[in-house]
Image: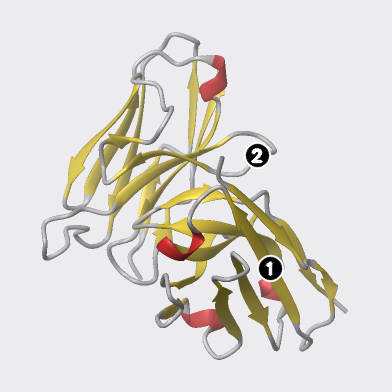
Amino acid sequence: EVQLVESGGGLVQPGRSLKLSCAASGFTFSNYGMAWVRQTPTKGLEWVASISTGGGNTYYRDSVKGRFTISRDNAKNTQYLQMDSLRSEDTATYYCARHRYYFDYWGQGVMVTVSS
Amino acid sequence: DVVMTQTPLSLPVSLGDQASISCRSSQSLVESNGNTHLHWYLQKPGQLPQLLLYKVSNRFSGVPDRFSGSGSETDFILKISRVESEDLGVYYCLQSTHLPYTFGAGTKLELK
């Protein structure tokens, strides 16, 4: 059974950093691209970033480019999202997702709140 | 960015009804190799989004055959042949042909 478990969310002040983790199990992690998708009541679902199987290719939405870094450790079956210079508009539930051309399996999500 | 426009935003139904949801993209979603990366999700209340259909019309594992998808280029339809109570929630379309990948705003399927 495919399982994705996020951790690392919480309350953080604007301008500070936070690092999300996503532990994967139930499939061969190194064979799949991975992604982060976030959701807010106002903006709905937004793709944030994706990473290729080996980690050599990464892709970001414009609003997070230069502030967020997606990475993965295939030996640990884990992907990460380093979020720097956080803004109030980054407040959302962040989902880890397995990425083929679509996002077929999602984690339960982790809440990130950016507020002073 | 490719804008995904879903209609209607709300769809009141009775159990057993047929339901149709439209998703229109601001650009063609056909790749140079002919693939069309338009996918459908359902998010039930309090749950994470779950994949229903991928590449327009392919049902994901475990998805009942009352769900079907069609369309091409910029216009796509999700149909539910006979709505059941477990189908209630918000439906989203997603395009992954063009970066950034974009979702529709969602269509809420609810009981009349």
Image-based side of A33 in relation to B112, left or right: left
Q: Residue furthest left?
A: B33
Q: Looking at the image, which is closer to me, B3 or A69?
A: A69
- The quadrant of the rendering that contains the N terminus of chain B is bottom left
Q: CA distance from mark 1 to mark 2?
A: 20 Å
Q: In the drawing, what numbered circle is on residue B47?
A: 2
Residue A21 on image: x %, y %: 68, 68
Read off the residue under disc 1: A21
Q: Residue furthest front?
A: A75
Q: In the drawing, what numbered circle is on residue B76?
A: none
Q: Say which chain tag 1 marks.
A: A
Q: Say which chain tag 2 marks.
A: B
Label 2 amino acid? Gln
Corner quadrant of residue B32 = bottom left
Q: How many numbered circles are shown?
A: 2
Q: Residues within 10 Å of mark 2 (few under 14, many from 20)?
A: few
Q: Looking at the image, which is closer to me, A41 or A99?
A: A99
A109 to B72, vertically: above or below = below
Colour pattern:
secondary structure
Q: Which residue occupies 61% across, 44% down?
A: B48
Secondary element under disc 2, as helix, strand or loop, is: loop
A59 to B105, vertically: above or below = below
Residue B7 on image: x %, y %: 38, 40
Label 1 amino acid? Ser
Q: Residue furthest top?
A: B16
B85 to B104, vertically: above or below = above
Q: Residues within 10 Å of mark 1 (few under 14, many from 20)?
A: many
